[in-house]
């Protein structure tokens, strides 16, 4: 099979292979965090706390849509990675074609559906009247740019499935820097208010997605499909949807719990939204690093599963878990030691009330980062060997836990219960995933042993 500049993840020491693959993804995610932080910092420090709250009030629903897109395209990438690991070039090309067709279809569906639902969404989230108009403007523009998000994630997942995690990093860095420049230009001299921040995000991602696709086509000959290979295949598309759609739906279901948390915070008021938004932004440091390593283990497991190397899967999952535990401990310590500096990064002269809301969130969530790392490693490993029901079931459990804390326990226990919803959800999901992983690996080991004897 022609490898181009792709990378085989079925050879080498597992932890070194996963770390080498994950580091560029971590770098990309950190730059992604950088430009979302820059977005919020520029909005908060130039337009004020109300504007920060307007942008923050949409954060969870934007993340909800992003999770679906990442899950959908990531699921397609898993099948591509399995085909690449098995050395089946024909299936690799079929997978690329199916990914593009599915991405085009869902771009249209998501954009129309999301843009038409902005008012109902904001009412459901109990958006305060004083920031409603700004929140609507920001969210509508972000939804118009769904296509850029879909195609950037599509090409990124295709390249990662082929072992290239560097190219998406380069274009994400470019996108991040461009976003910051456009933020300043649109908000300050052009005086576009929160609409400027939204357009900056959409345009930066669209330009980055287009350039990444052009570059990938020039660099990877395996992506050069003939007219025959570009033809739509319902069978191939359905095979990819059977993995991608449950993953996208599953990741979105996880976000429904976060929507319940956001709605509970929105009921408290603008100060709570501002404090929660600031803490949530820096909390994304751990989430993005863990997700990056999750992408690494997903592609590692997919390729090794395609190659039939179960021992490497077990070693890789264990190494990945140890790496994430160490990183989460370091990041947690950093956030807790620096928690007094969080809100001032986003709001000039913040009130004591806003500061307290931010501190309460961090001191409630950060000590439980261990569970987040374990959750991502085991859920991703299970998904990457083709099992979608267990991660989905864990997702439903996680959703129930978040809603219980955010919507029910927040009534007697207040804001702290909303914050505790996150670690409680992680723990309850793990209670299913770890036993399933153990049983699944034993089953796959047994199947491999039988084939070897035969």
Image (cartoon, rainbow, N blue to C red):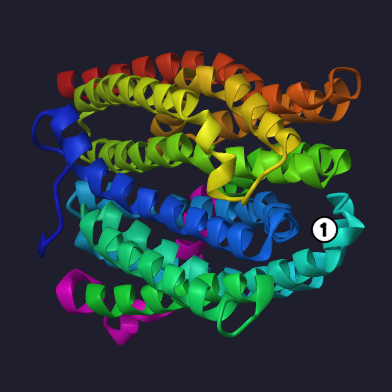
Number of numbered markers: 1
Q: Which residues are magenta?
A: 217-245
12 is within the stretch colored magenta? no
Q: Is residue 295 above or below residue 439?
A: below
Between 432 and 214, the one lying in front of the other is 214
Query: Is residue 397 in view?
Result: no
Relative to 314, does residue 79 appear above or below in the rendering? Answer: below
Badge 1 crowding class, 10 Å Cα cut-off, few under 14, some 14 to 19, many 20 or more, is some
Image point (60%, 35%), residue name: 392
* Front residue of this view, candidates 267 and 12: 267
Any part of residue 126 in sight: yes
Q: Position of residue 74 (x, y in %)?
A: 43, 52
Residue 411: image location, x then y, percent: 90, 24
Residue 235 magenta: yes
Residue 137 image-quadrant placement: bottom right
Where residue 353 appears, x then y in whole percent? Answer: 75, 34
* Residue at the image point whose x is 68% and y is 39% from the top: 276
Residue 62 spot, x, y in % from top left:
64, 57
Seen in the picture, residue 119 relative to 426 is either above or below; the reply is below
Task: State left or right for residue 161 relative to residue 257.
Answer: left
Reading the image, the residue beneath label 1 is: 121
Out of 112 and 368, give the one closest to the viewer: 368
Q: Which residue is rendered at x = 59% and y = 37% of the image?
A: 279
Residue 47: image quadrant is: bottom right
Q: Which quadrant of the view contains residue 444?
A: top left
Residue at x-position 50% and y-position 48%: 243
Quadrant where the C terminus sits is top left
Magenta segment, principal secondary structure?
helix
Q: Quadrant of the N terminus?
A: bottom left
Q: Nearer the viewer, residue 358 or 169?
A: 358
- Helix, strand or loop at disc 1? helix
């Amino acid at each position: 099979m022609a490898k181009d500049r792709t990378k085989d993840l079925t050879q080498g020491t597992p932890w070194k292979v996963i770390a080498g693959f994950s580091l560029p993804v971590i770098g990309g995610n950190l730059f992604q965090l950088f430009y979302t932080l820059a977005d919020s910092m520029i909005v908060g420090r130039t337009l004020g706390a109300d504007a920060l709250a307007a942008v923050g009030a949409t954060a969870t629903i934007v993340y909800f849509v992003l999770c679906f897109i990442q899950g959908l395209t990531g699921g397609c990438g898993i099948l591509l990675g399995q085909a690449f690991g098995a050395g089946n070039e024909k299936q690799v090309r079929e997978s690329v074609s199916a990914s593009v067709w599915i991405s085009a279809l869902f771009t249209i569906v998501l954009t129309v559906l999301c843009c038409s639902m902005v008012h109902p969404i904001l009412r459901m989230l109990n958006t305060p009247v004083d920031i409603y108009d700004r929140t609507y403007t920001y969210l509508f523009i972000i939804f118009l740019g769904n296509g850029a998000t879909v195609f950037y994630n599509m090409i990124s997942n295709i390249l990662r499935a082929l072992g290239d995690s560097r190219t998406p990093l380069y274009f994400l860095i470019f996108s991040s820097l461009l976003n910051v420049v456009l933020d300043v230009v649109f908000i300050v001299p052009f005086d576009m208010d929160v609409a400027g921040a939204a357009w900056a995000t959409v345009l930066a991602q669209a330009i980055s997605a287009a350039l990444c696709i052009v570059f990938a086509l020039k660099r990877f000959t395996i992506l050069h499909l003939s007219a025959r290979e570009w033809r739509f295949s319902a069978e191939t598309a359905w095979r990819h949807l059977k993995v991608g759609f449950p993953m996208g739906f599953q990741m979105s279901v996880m976000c429904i719990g976060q929507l319940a948390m956001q709605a509970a915070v929105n009921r408290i008021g603008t100060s709570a939204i501002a404090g929660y938004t600031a803490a949530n932004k820096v909390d994304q440091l751990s989430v993005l690093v863990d997700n990056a390593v999750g992408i690494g283990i997903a592609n590692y497991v997919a390729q090794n599963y395609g190659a039939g190397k179960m021992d490497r899967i077990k070693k890789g999952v264990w190494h990945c878990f140890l790496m994430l535990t160490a990183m989460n401990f370091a990041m947690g310590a950093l956030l807790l030691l620096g928690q007094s500096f969080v809100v001032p990064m986003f709001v000039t002269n913040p009130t004591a009330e806003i500061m307290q809301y931010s501190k309460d969130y961090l001191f409630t969530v950060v000590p439980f980062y261990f569970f987040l790392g374990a959750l991502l490693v085991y859920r991703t490993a299970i998904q990457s060997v083709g099992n979608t029901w267990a991660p989905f079931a864990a997702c439903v459990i996680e959703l129930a836990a978040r809603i219980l804390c955010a919507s029910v326990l927040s009534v007697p226990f207040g804001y702290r219960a909303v914050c505790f919803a996150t670690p409680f959800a992680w723990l309850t999901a793990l209670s299913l995933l770890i036993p399933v992983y153990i049983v699944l690996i034993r089953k796959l080991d047994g199947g491999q042993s039988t084939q070897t004897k035969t």
